[in-house]
Amino acid sequence: MLEAQGVVREYRGGDGAVLRVLAGVDLSVRAGEMVAIVGASGAGKSTLLQVLGALDSATAGTVRIGGREVPASDDIAMAALRNRAVGFVFQFHHLLAEFSAVENVAMPLLISGRAPAAAQARATALLAQVGLAARTAHRPGELSGGEQQRVAVARALAADPAVLLADEPSGNLDHQTAEQLHEMLAALVAGSGLALVVVTHNASLAARAHRVLVLEDGVLRPMPETA
């Protein structure tokens, strides 16, 4: 469902020096699989997610989503593939404060041209799926942190993506609320056939993954087994 081969990402600093953040990343994630990526702060984990999700272009290498290669040299085509096939969840929910939960979830569908009634029906169903059937009319300020993040997950699923990318999704939540979110994400993967890649420092969330990989020196390696 998601494949990266030899992905390199370099940046050129103001002094002309080249900083290589990703140095040849290989990754393959199947439908219904959850992969956790861990590593030190500054290792390039967020950069990797941006490249995998077509938010950023690789300097070299290829990324395929649902069998289609990300057209790194075509911003419009990248955006079209990203909007159709990838969902994103970040540490902060980035919900629109003036809109209700159902309106927030429906927003990407409306932007893509979905009829309002169909967009609202899809959003309502997704909010029920993440346990918020009774909170659809509430604005973000009327929801708890965990509820806001559930709305963000529902919004990420609105377009029925093949791939879900999550960057520290529980990093701003207390332990109990984080555990509830972790359980929900694992259930979504098991029940929907999503390919989920999650960047996390949370050991509990990583433990729910089918595989844990470490990003170190710009490449992904299997998590070393502990005695």
Image (cartoon, rainbow, N blue to C red):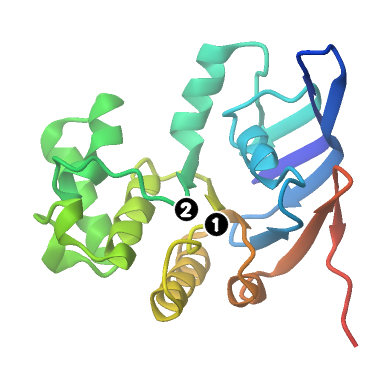
Q: Which residue matches tag 2?
A: 91
Relative height, residue 13 to residue 41 (above, below):
above
**Residue 211 locus on image (x, y percent):** 74, 67
Q: Measuring 90% from the left and 88% from the top, which residue is drawn there?
A: 227
Question: Residue 195 placed where, x, y %?
Answer: 59, 54
User: Residue 45 or 105: which is nearer the viewer?
Assistant: 45
Position above or below: 124 against 86: below
Residue occupied by mark 1: 168
Instruction: Give percent across and percent down for residue 169.
Output: 49, 58
Residue 158 position (above or below residue 177): above
How far apart are the alpha carbons under marks 1 and 2?
Answer: 5 Å
Q: How many marks?
A: 2
Circles 1 and 2: CB distance less than 8 Å? Answer: yes
- Coordinates of residue 94 in the picture (x, y in percent): 35, 43
Question: Callout 1: few (<14), some (14-19), or many (20+) C-alpha neighbours within 10 Å?
Answer: some
Q: Which residue corresponds to the image point at 61% horizontal and 75% vertical from the top-left?
A: 208
10 Å neighbourhood of mark 2: few (<14), some, or many (≥20)?
Answer: some
Q: Amino acid at mark 1?
A: Glu
- Residue 67 visible here: no
